[in-house]
Image (tube, rainbow, N blue to C red):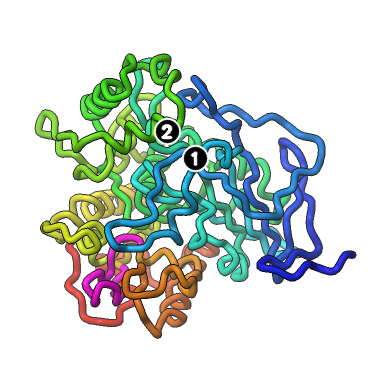
Amino acid sequence: MRAPDAGQHRLEWPRVVATTHGPVRGAHRHGIDVFHAVPYAATPTGRARFAAPAPPESWTRVRDASIPRPSMAPAPTRDRIGDLDLTAISGPPWRPGDHQDYLAVDVWAPAAVPERRPVVVFVHGGGFIGGWGGAAAYDGTSLARHGLIVVTVNYRLGAAGWLHLPDAPDNRGLLDVLAALSWVRENIEEFGGDPGRVTVLGQSAGATIVAALLAMPAAKGLFQRAISQSGNALGAFTPAQAEKVTEALATAAGVEATADGFAAVGDRDLIRVVSELGGLDLTIGGVPDPMLGLSPFAPVLDPASIPTQPAESITSGMDLLAGVTTDEANLYLVPTGRDGDAEAMSRALFGLGTAALARANTALGGRTFRYEFAWRSGAFGGALGAAHTVELPFVFGTAHLPSLRGPRSLLGIADDLEQVTAAVQRAWVGFIRDGDPGWPPNDPAIRRLGVRLPVQRMAG
């Protein structure tokens, strides 16, 4: 065997795995096998950007999946909110031609384990406009060292994934995640995973997608447990709200408000017109905008996928870990200097929908574990607090990343990151492995995690 090259990634003992579409070669890094950008669906181009996902073309030669490479869905750059550095969770800027095969997964697996391991599938956030499953903060190495198979998923973003069109299926980004879960069911055993012990985990937009999956008959049996971190199970647009976005975007792009019309608009131009879209008043017929103007996209109520709000559509309960951070809205207010009622904004965006999902799951016989993440970041002089997304580095064990540390970075300057990581991972791994995060199910008291400083609890 050739000695490993010196450098950022130590490669040794590469493993080849036969997937249903072709063989892939990963990298072995310090006891963990890693596979990057493995396609689960064909890359949608042209008119196909607005179609349901299709299987990827099969291959026969071994595909090199050993080195991280750009695989981001077309999206605007969202590496900052105001003065806050978010590069660790945003990924690199999207550039045409760089990001091939973006409907793909990354997989981390403990090497040479004798028994099949529990699986966690992560669906990233980003307001349905941005995000990338391969971002540095979502590195699955730490969770894999706890004996889990970790899968991170990319899905279509922006107009390609979520624009409501009369001649295309709704919620194409959701259909992508459904296709990725089907890929996991068919392939994860080859990576050492147990297809009967799959937990789907989503944060923010990803958690809203998880709630929608709970309501979809087509998703039944693809996973056995779910984790919702700061999602909104009451966050789908009505058709009228979605149509208003479609009309505004079609006018801005100078095309008909159809998939055939938008097919003529390239990815770069589509991103531009979405980014230039002014604030739309999406409160229609007394129904408020569930995104509060932060994004023109959300899942759309649709008889074929989400007939009513996800919290009102689920038909059976399961093991569910669901929670929020104490100061969710601070992410949008503090770094930008915006004024606003942070508590009301937090409740509307995340608190009410999370509470509704928890109640629905419990009422249907599911075991529900609720939490509130209360660790306060010291960023912006301590004003950022327990803001939206702040729990993610602790879940993944990536709080040590330099881009997360500093006075204008997500975690600020702190000396208790290892202790908080250990406590959070103990709860998340216990839930994924055994359905036990460390406290009783269906407890009226919400478990507060990561407490370091006194905080005012957000009502749910």
Q: Which amino acid does label 2 sit on?
A: Gly
Q: Earlier in the sequence, mark 2 or mark 1?
A: 1
In the image, what residue occupies the spot 30% across and 45% down? 233
Asked whether residue 377 is drawn in magenta, I would say: yes
Marks 1 and 2: in contact by CB < 8 Å? yes
Residue 220 showing in the rendered view:
no
Mark identifier at residue 73 = 1
Image vertical order of residue 111 relative to residue 20, above or below: below
Q: Nearer the observer, disc 2 or disc 1? A: 1
- Quarter that holds the N terminus: bottom right
In the image, what residue occupies the spot 44% across and 68% down? 403
Element on which disc 2 rests: helix
Which x, y percent locates residue 267? Answer: 45, 31
Distance Cα–Cα, label 2 vs label 1: 10 Å
In the image, what residue occupies the spot 51% across and 22% down? 46
| Number of on-image labels | 2
Q: Quadrant of residue 441?
A: bottom left
Q: Name the residue under label 2.
A: 161
Image vertical order of residue 256 relative to residue 132, above or below: above
Element on which disc 1 rests: loop
User: Left of 36 or right of it: where is 112?
Assistant: right
Q: Crowding at label 2, few (<14), some or many (≥20) Cα neighbours within 10 Å?
A: many
Residue range corresponding to the magenta coloring: 373-389
Q: Residue lying furthest bottom in this view?
A: 415
Q: In which quarter of the image is residue 297?
A: top left
Image vertical order of residue 253 relative to residue 394, above or below: above
- Quarter that holds the C terminus: bottom left
